[in-house]
Image: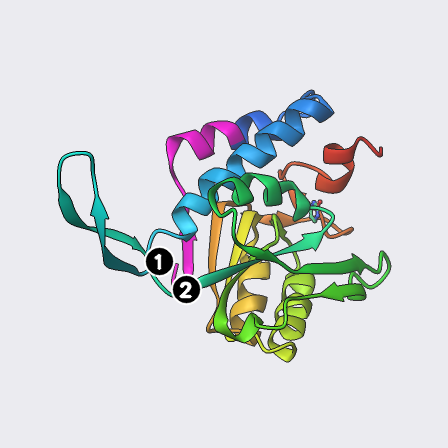
Amino acid sequence: MRGVTIVDHPLVQHKLTLLRDKSRSTKGFRELFSEIGTLLCYEVTRDLPLEMTEVETPFATMQSPRLSGKKLVLAPIVRAGMGFLEGMLELLPSARVAHIGLYRDPRTLVAVEYFFKAPDDIAERLVLVLHPMLATGNSAVAALDRLKEAGAKSLRIVCLLATPQGIDKVQGHHPDVHIWTAAIDEELDASGYIVPGVGDVGDRMYGTK
Ligand code: URA
C-alpha cells in the first residue's frame, strides 16, 4: 500500500500477538508495548541521513558514519502514545518531546484537543507522531493539523495497528505523511475500536478498566 510501511519483523509480529491476548497483565502489556515502540523506532529511522566523521580507534584514525542534521521530535498522542515513548527514547535519547492531549468525543468520535506543547524549533526537526491505534483517523488528522500549525514540516506516524479507513483519512488530509504500522486490522466497531485489535490501549496499559 502506497505511503504505508508494515513492519513485518518477526519480533514485532510475535510481541503484537502476545499483546492481543486479553489475559496479558497490565505490567506485561506495558512492557511489550514499550519493546514494540523500540523496534518500530528502529524501522522508522532506517533512512536517517549519515555523514562521515573522523574517529580515533585504539589502533588507527578512520572515517566513520554518524547521524547528520536531522534532529527529532517524538510526539505522543496521550494516553496511548505514551506507551511507545520510553522505548523510543532509549534509542533517541536526545529527541525532544511534544505532547498532544486529545480525547475522542464518545458520541461523535471527533477528536477534541485539551493540551498541546511542542518545542519552538519543531520546523527544523523530523516529527514522529506516536499514535498506536490509527482507528477512524480523526485523532491522527487533528494531531497532524495541530503540529503543522505549530510549524512542523516533516512528519511520520508510528502505529501499532491501523485500519484501512484510518489510513484513507490520513492520506486524504495529509498525503505527505508516511505511516508505519505493525499490522492493518480490517474492522472498526460502533465505538471506534479496532477489531480484532488489542482493546483500549490506555485502559490496558494503565489498568483503568
Ligand atoms: N484506541 C484504542 O485504545 N483502541 C482502539 O481499538 C482504538 C482506539
3D distance between C-alphas at marks 2 and 1: 7 Å
The residue depicted at 61 percent of the width and 45 percent of the height is: 85
Nearest-to-viewer mark from 2 and 1: 2
Q: Is residue 55 above or below residue 155?
A: above
Left or right of residue 187, residue 106 in this image: right
Amino acid beneath label 2: Lys
Left or right of residue 197, residue 65 in this image: left
Q: Residue 89: percent from the left, percent from the top?
A: 55, 44
In magenta segment, residue 4: yes
Work out which quarter of the rendered image holds the C terminus and state it: top right
Amino acid beneath label 1: Leu
Which residue is denoted by mark 2 in the rendering? 70
Work out which quarter of the rendered image holds the N terminus and state it: bottom left
Name the quadrant containing residue 26.
Answer: top right
Mark 1: few, some, or many residues within 10 Å (few <14, many ≥20)?
few
Judging depth in this view, the residue of 190 and 65 nearest the camera is 65
Element carrying mark 2: loop
Name the quadrant containing residue 53.
Answer: bottom left
Element carrying mark 1: loop
The residue depicted at 43 percent of the width and 58 percent of the height is: 4
Of labels 2 and 1, earlier in sequence is 1
Q: Is mark 2 within 8 Å of ligand 1?
A: no
Q: Residue 10: percent from the left, percent from the top?
A: 38, 31
Q: How many discs mark residues in the rendered view?
A: 2
Which residue is denoted by mark 1 in the rendering? 48
Q: Residue 191: percent from the left, percent from the top?
A: 78, 51
Mark 2: few, some, or many residues within 10 Å (few <14, many ≥20)?
few
Left or right of residue 169, residue 24 in this image: right
Residue 27 shows in this picture: yes
- Marks 2 & 1, CB-CB < 8 Å contact: yes
Find the magenta span and give its range.
1-15
The residue depicted at 59 percent of the width and 60 percent of the height is: 166
